Image (cartoon, rainbow, N blue to C red):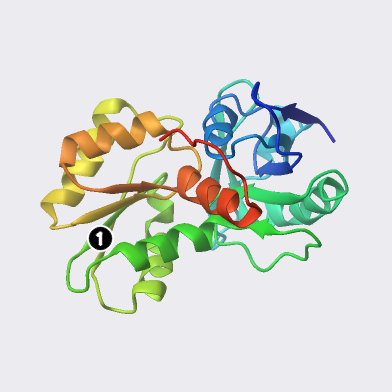
Amino acid sequence: MTSTSTRPESVGSGVRIGVVTIGQTPRTDLTPELARHLPGAEIVERGVLDGLSAAQIHELAPQAGEHVLTTRLRDGGSAVIGEGSVMDRLPAVIRELEADVDAVLLACTGPFPNIDHRRPLFVPDRIIAHAIGAAATAGEPVGIIAPLPEQVEDTTRKFDAVLRGSSAVHVTACSPYTGTTSELRRAGRALAEDGARLLAMDCFGYTADMRRIVAEETGLPVIVARSIAARLAAEALGLEGTAVS
């Protein structure tokens, strides 16, 4: 299994954090941002699709009725795959990685079932949903940007389950991998026009720059999955330093 490691130039904390993407490593679009929120930690990357050819990845396309996931590949492209194919491989990737790290951060907000683990495992699917639940004002709608139209129904259910009817949930789609800046602005604007007062970007592919674009377009507070998950991991692991927003 291929792995890559990133250590900040500053003095390290001695903590090694495994970052598992459901795509391929290295995630040059992701780890620099994570490092800023995980001061002093060494990041060790693993990818569920590492070592697979384009033809093999194509065979992992979602089956009828299956949760749909999207992820970034080593060449900068993206793939749409089924949750079942990921779960066939993910537990073994985590199990192997745990031998080398102190904790594992799953770099995906997909609705995975419980995964056996021996080290702390940070699951962004739960983190971002409960962050919105904590930050939302009762009676004020929330807006969620998901990557794919096929994910809108699942995403709505996920946030509804946490908000329990206290706030309406509006979801629209714009891929962080294939969407344009104009499409991202349009997605944010549509949610604001629907009355959303708080937004979330529900995929680890959304970057800090994408968050800034949506915030500028809408004038609303925006929570992005990768930073909220990394900040929680840093707090839980006692990482000290100046995290960059």
Which residue occupies the foreground of this view, 219 or 201?
219
Which residue occupies the foreground of this view, 50 or 53?
50
Residue 67: x and y, percent? Answer: 55, 58
In the drawing, does residue 133 fall left or right of residue 72? left
In the drawing, does residue 136 fall left or right of residue 60? left
Residue 79: x and y, percent? Answer: 57, 36
Residue 35: x and y, percent? Answer: 58, 33
Q: Residue at x 33, y 37 (%)?
A: 211
Picture quadrant of residue 182? top left
Residue 174 visible from this viewpoint = yes
Q: Residue at x 42, y 29 (%)?
A: 178
Q: Residue at x 17, y 67 (%)?
A: 140
Residue 203 visible from this viewpoint = no
For mark 1, give the secondary structure.
strand
Q: Residue at x 70, y 27 (%)?
A: 7
Q: Quadrant of the N terminus?
A: top right
Residue type at tag 1: Val
Which residue occupies the foreground of this view, 130 or 148?
130
Report the residue marked by disc 1: 142
